[in-house]
Image (tube, rainbow, N blue to C red):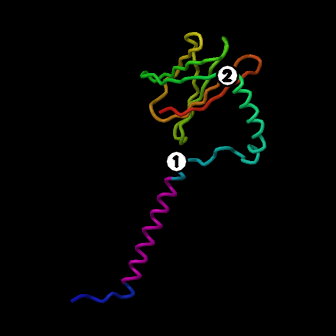
């Protein structure tokens, strides 16, 4: 003998369904807010006003003709080969964790050869966003951002 399906059964099913949906939503929202701070720029309006300046700087940088190839060595240090840059160019870097869980790591480089640099710091394993900056007297600056894995 089966019992009849009543309104209490339907109410229990609806409450249980929405309780699961709400629990999943709160869990996902908590995970999302704990892994990404959400700030790309402090003030998007101010950043938009600088956009044309950034485009001009990118064009000037492209006209320099400089380029780099970064290699992550087994000992954790970074080797960077620079092409097109004149002698006396300085290289600096900043390693940022993409999700902001680890503090930024400033990276200093030593020149080991003409156009070749080796980092002083060891970069821990993981996924990093590396920002490199080549600078030379006279205001010549070249920047690149790349992902290391």
Going from the N terminus, do you reach mark 1 or mark 2 first? 1
For the residue carrying disc 1, how many other residues have a C-alpha within 10 Å: few (<14), some (14-19), or many (20+)? few
Q: Quadrant of residue 20?
A: bottom left
Name which residue lies at 52% across and 57% down: 29
Crowding at dot 2, Cα within 10 Å, few <14 / some 14-19 / many 20+, comes out as few
Judged left or right of residue 134, residue 149 is left
Residue 66 lies, in percent from the top left, at 65, 21
The image's mark for residue 35 is 1
Residue 120 placement (x, y as % from top left): 53, 19
- Residue closest to the eye, 62 or 51: 62
Residue 118 against residue 20 in the figure, above or below: above
Residue at 60% in and 32% down = 145
In the image, taking residue 136 as reference, residue 20 lies left or right, namely: left
Which residue is nearer to you in this view: 68 or 93?
68
Callout in the foreground (1, 2): 2
**Can you say whether 69 is above or below 5 in the image?**
above
Q: Is residue 43 magenta?
A: no
Residue 19: x and y, percent? 44, 70
Q: Quadrant of the N terminus?
A: bottom left
Question: Is-magenta flag for residue 12?
Answer: yes
Q: Which residue is mark 2?
A: 65
Give the Cα distance between marks 1 and 2: 37 Å
**Secondary structure of the residue carrying numbered label 1:** helix
> Is 78 on the left-hand or right-hand side of 42?
left
Q: Main secondary structure of the magenta part?
A: helix
- Provide the residue span drawn in magenta: 9-31
Q: Residue 124 has which mark?
A: none
**Circle count:** 2
Q: Position of residue 21 (x, y in %)?
A: 45, 67
């Amino acid at each position: 003998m089966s019992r009849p399906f009543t309104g209490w059964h339907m109410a229990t099913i609806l409450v249980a369904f929405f309780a699961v949906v709400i629990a999943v939503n709160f869990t996902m929202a908590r995970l999302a807010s704990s892994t990404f701070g959400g700030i790309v720029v402090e003030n998007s309006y101010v950043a938009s006003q600088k956009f044309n300046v950034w485009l001009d700087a990118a064009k000037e940088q492209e006209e320099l003709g400089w380029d780099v190839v970064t290699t992550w060595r087994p000992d954790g240090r970074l080797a960077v080969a620079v092409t097109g840059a004149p002698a006396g160019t300085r290289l600096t870097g900043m390693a940022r964790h993409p999700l902001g869980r680890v503090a930024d790591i400033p990276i200093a480089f030593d020149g080991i050869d003409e156009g070749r640099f080796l980092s002083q710091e060891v970069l821990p394993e993981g996924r990093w966003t590396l920002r490199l900056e080549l600078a030379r007297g006279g205001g010549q600056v070249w920047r690149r951002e790349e992902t290391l894995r």
